[in-house]
Amino acid sequence: MTERRILWRRLDAKGHDACRALFQNDEWVLDGAAVYLENRDITNVRYRVRCDSNWICKSAYVHGWCGPTKVDVEIAREDDGLWRCNGMEITAVSGAWDVDLGFTPTTNTCAIRRLGLDVGQRKRGVAAWLDASDWKLKPLEQYYDRFAATGYEYGSSEHGFQARLETDNFGFVREYPGLWEAEE
């Protein structure tokens, strides 16, 4: 059994996120909890992401609250690439390999591990993105460019976003400029 843990501090708002990655029964399970303040609303959510041994997402679950709003989202990816959110088919993200929970750096780890890029390689793709502004699953074009042993440029031209991520050897993000950093 392989297990890793990390605690992040949010930089653009008050908040923290704790995550544990556990490999058992031929799958990766990432369990975590994020608590943060955004737009004067306190958010408190627990999440679980399940990936197969190759880091292809199988499911994700987010449960908690954001201000007065209850959050209860269940995401599933079927073997044929079809995604469901709370039982409803989301065709806009069909074929995506990764889930991107927009409120945590945890899911960057899944993509980084699945891609297995060598230094100098770059890959583009579409993720099934859970937008924390409305808790809906949407397509998000994104890319990862590995520029060093533990360095990745991550971006989405659709949102005009890019960041140079520093990771540990496992693939957990240690530095996400302006958004997150690992606590020592």
Image (spheres, rainbow, N blue to C red):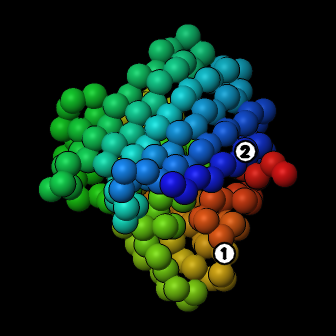
Q: Say which residue appears at 47% left-offset and 76% top-offset.
A: 116
Q: Residue at x 76, y 52 (%)?
A: 182
The 10 Å Cα crowd at callout 1, few under 14, some 14 to 19, many 20 or more, is: many
Most foreground residue, 132 or 75: 75
- SS for dot 2: strand
Location of residue 106 in the rendering, given as x and y in whole percent from the top left corner? 56, 50
Residue extending farthest to the bottom is: 120
Q: Amino acid at mark 2?
A: Leu
SS at mark 1? Answer: strand
Q: Residue furthest right?
A: 184
From the viewer's perspective, is residue 1 above or below residue 142? Answer: above
* Residue 142 appears anywhere in the view: no
Is residue 136 or residue 109 the one in the foreground?
A: 109
Extreme-top residue of the structure: 68
Furthest toward the front, the residue is 1
Image quadrant of residue 44? top right
Front of the two marks 2 and 1: 2
Residue 110 in picture, x, y percent from top left: 47, 58
The image shows residue 51 at horizontal and vertical percentages of 38, 53
Mark pair 2, 1: CA separation = 19 Å
Q: Does residue 140 appear to the left or right of 1 in the view shown? A: left
Instruction: Report the number of discs.
Output: 2
Find disc 2 in the rendering and name its residue. Answer: 7
Is there any visible trace of residue 173 in the rendered image?
Answer: yes
Percent position of residue 137, x then y: 35, 39
User: Which comes sooner in the sequence, label 2 or label 1?
Assistant: 2
Of the residues shown, which amino acid type is indicated by label 1? Gly
The image's mark for residue 73 is: none
**Where residue 151 is drawn, which disc sits there?**
1
- Residue shown at the point (49%, 67%) measured from the top left: 113
